[in-house]
Amino acid sequence: MCQVTHRIMDSLTASTMWMIPGQNQSWVSEFILIGFSRDPTTNSILFFVFLLIYLSSVLGNGLIIMLVCLDTQLHTPMYFFLCTLSLLDMSYVTTTVPQMLVHLLAHSQTISFAGCWLQMYVFGALGIAESILFIVMAYDRYVAICYPLRYTVILNWGLCIRLTSGTWMFGFFSSLLHTFFTMSLPYCGPNRVNHYFCEGPSVRSLACMDTHLIEMVDLVLSVCVLLIPMSLIVASYIHIAKAILKIKSTQGRCKAFSTCASHLTVVTFFYAPATYIYMRPNSSLSPERDKQISLFYNVFTALLNPVVYSLRNKDIKRAFLKVIGHGRLDQ
């Protein structure tokens, strides 16, 4: 009877578990992403909603990249960083949403262990790079408003390229640490991740050991990529606000505040939910709420960026009207 029972259990777990040679410990070979709902009708509605959001995000950010590349009048540090932000957002949302769309309609919501590892790494790398890029963009606004006559001298193209390259390199290196520590934990079951993608805290909660040390490592990393950037951005805008208040012209003050408002809006939508998700212990996890909150810095921010920067930016509107009206931007 015991042998029959063991055979049944082995057959049930063979597809998702594998044995470590020489040990009695079994590890999961794939995860199941639960997603948002098990109701087919609800999933169909969510599919079309998120498909529309995804296409709008990709097209909006792609349009900004195209306009910045084609219009020589947009070849300035500010728009170079905006172009980089759009590229990050396109990549960021593509890391998670296409797979989520497939899982909303498919019967199977599985992802391999290696696939989960890769998704967590790329998602983290792009997210951290975007977090650091917001500091660079805040510094750009600080120089433009506080030192307008020396703007192009201070932020020369060499410095712009080094700053942008540094954000990408820091993002991919930092994410490697986070992903390595998280995915090196033993996962011996269950393998059901209550999320729509492989996000670190949700996956880590399934580990078969105490994760307190890993949580402390993640906390230190979160301080470096969330709290420190936010502090630097706040410091930059304190100096910017002081400089704006010294402007005698009301129109000049309004223009300066309008330029910074777009950046502050996007920064708030990104940092606030990301800080909530990553800077708290596993014991306070609330899976359903976390899935909703993560949509803000993963999906909605990528949609918000082109909307905010295009609707509030006369240069982007002018470049777009040139494309529509003349088909050329080199005039």
Image (tube, rainbow, N blue to C red):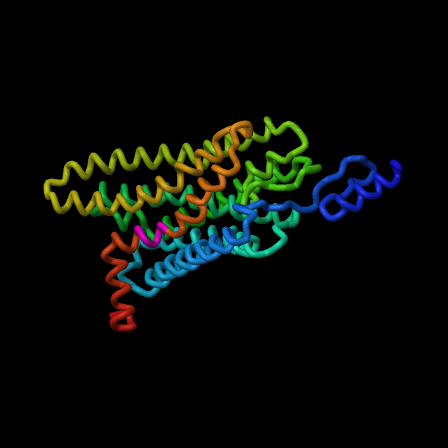
Residue 282 rendering spot, x and y as whole percentages: 55, 30
Q: Position of residue 271 (x, y in %)?
A: 40, 38
Number of numbered discs: 0
Residue for point 36% across, 44% down: 136
From this view, report whether residue 169 is shown above or below residue 230. below
The magenta span reads: 304-308
For residue 322, say whether it is visible: yes
Q: Quadrant of the C terminus?
A: bottom left
Classify residue 177 by image quadrant: top right
Q: Is residue 125 left or right of residue 190?
A: left
Vertical arrangement, residue 315 with respect to residue 254, above or below: below
The reply to whether the magenta stretch includes residue 241 is: no
Residue at point 88%, 39% (across, down): 3
The residue drawn where x is 89% and y is 37% is 1
Identify the residue at image location x=37%, y=48%.
159
**Most common SS among magenta residues:** helix
From what the image shows, is residue 261 above or below residue 230?
below
For residue 223, side relative to residue 238 (left or right) = right
Q: Is residue 326 above or below residue 173?
A: below
- What is the quadrant of residue 229 in the picture? top left
The one nearer the camera, 200 or 37, is 37
Residue 25: give x, y in percent of width and height: 77, 35
Q: Is residue 307 magenta?
A: yes
Q: Position of residue 18 (x, y in %)?
A: 76, 44
